[in-house]
């Protein structure tokens, strides 16, 4: 009876470490598919018409709120939501950028080149500006630089109607997962477009992607202001945003919306 009970506990705990929700993500001509405890990589070469498939057992683990996936004797950091699935290696470099929307759709995931901020921190010669949060590398978030808890500090970019924006909060670093809890993270944001208040955005305390959709008929300079934070255990007066990307396939173009 004890063995059965222990087995049931183990099974219930192991479910926490499997991927739920959408289980197929494509990047270029490659696809990553989760089937129970198995990870399947499929690749199609358009030049040779060759299809390949590799299967691995995988497991998930969480360290200080940061997710990692282990397979093929390797460990990658994961940032994900139901739409996106990114993998990063131990050098904080992105090695997989997948979406649920099909092959080549990952090319629609982009960063805002016109992003600006209200302030940024300079520490030991490192500038923690919005230029760092492009998603290609981690370990250098935007950290607001004003005294206090970062309330009313902001970043801005040009947004289009129906655009899907994905935000990852906190200080995210492969080798130092404790930084996520040590630094503060935005808990509530206010969204403005051309200084018009649009909505309050409540964020969960996770580095994984959280989606913001620009309302239909709204376009212009979008500003995300920090109005509440999850306090960091070591650096409560430094609020961080890890990354902001958007899916340009869903935004209504400037020309068509005029």
Image (spheres, rainbow, N blue to C red):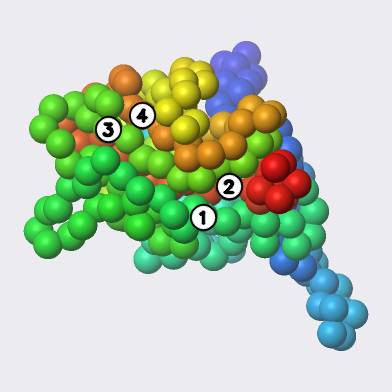
Residue 179, given in percent of the width and then of the height, sits at 26, 42
Q: Are marks 2 and 4 in contact (CB under 8 Å)?
A: no
Label whose residue precedes the other's in the sequence (3 or 1): 1
Dot 3 falls on a residue whose secondary structure is loop
Residue 186 image position (x, y, % from top left): 34, 28
User: Which residue is identified by label 3?
Assistant: 153
Work out whether mark 2 precedes mark 3 in sequence or the reverse, and give the earlier one: 3
Label 3 with label 1: CB-CB less than 8 Å: no
* Residue at the image point whose x is 67% and y is 62% from the top: 107
Residue under label 2, please give it: 246
Q: Report the Cα–Cα distance between label 3 and label 1.
A: 20 Å
The answer to the question of whether label 3 and label 4 lie on touching residues, with beta carbons closer than 8 A, is yes
Going from N to C along the chain, the mark reached first, 2 or 4, is 4
**In this view of the protein, which residue sits in the foreground, 217 or 167?**
217
User: Which one is earlier in the sequence, the residue at label 3 or at label 4?
Assistant: 3
Q: Which mark is residue 111?
A: 1
Mark 1 and mark 4 lie on one chain; the one further toward the N terminus is 1
Q: Locate the N terminus by quadrant.
A: top right
């Amino acid at each position: 009876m004890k063995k059965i009970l222990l087995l049931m506990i183990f099974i219930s705990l192991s479910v926490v470490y499997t991927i739920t929700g959408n289980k197929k993500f494509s990047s270029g001509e490659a696809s990553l598919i989760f089937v129970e405890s198995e990870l399947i990589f499929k690749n199609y070469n358009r030049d040779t018409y060759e299809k390949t498939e590799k299967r691995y057992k995988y497991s998930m683990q969480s360290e200080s709120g940061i997710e990692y996936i282990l397979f093929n004797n390797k460990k990658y950091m994961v940032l994900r939501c139901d739409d996106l699935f990114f993998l990063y290696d131990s050098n904080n470099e992105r090695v997989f950028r997948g979406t649920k929307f099909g092959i080549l759709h990952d090319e629609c995931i982009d960063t805002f080149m016109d992003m600006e901020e209200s302030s940024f921190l300079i520490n030991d010669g490192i500038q923690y500006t919005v230029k760092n949060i492009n998603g290609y590398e981690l370990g250098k978030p935007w950290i607001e630089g004003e005294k206090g808890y970062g309330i009313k500090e902001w970043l801005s970019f040009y947004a289009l109607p129906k655009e899907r924006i994905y935000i990852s909060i906190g200080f995210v670093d492969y080798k130092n997962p404790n930084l996520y809890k040590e630094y503060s993270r935005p808990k509530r944001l206010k969204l403005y477009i051309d200084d018009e208040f649009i909505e309050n955005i409540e964020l969960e305390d996770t580095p994984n992607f959280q989606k913001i959709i620009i309302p239909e008929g709204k376009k212009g300079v979008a500003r995300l202001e920090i109005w509440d934070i999850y306090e960091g255990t070591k650096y409560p007066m430094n609020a961080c945003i890890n990354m902001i990307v958007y899916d340009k396939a869903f935004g209504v173009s400037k020309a068509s919306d005029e």
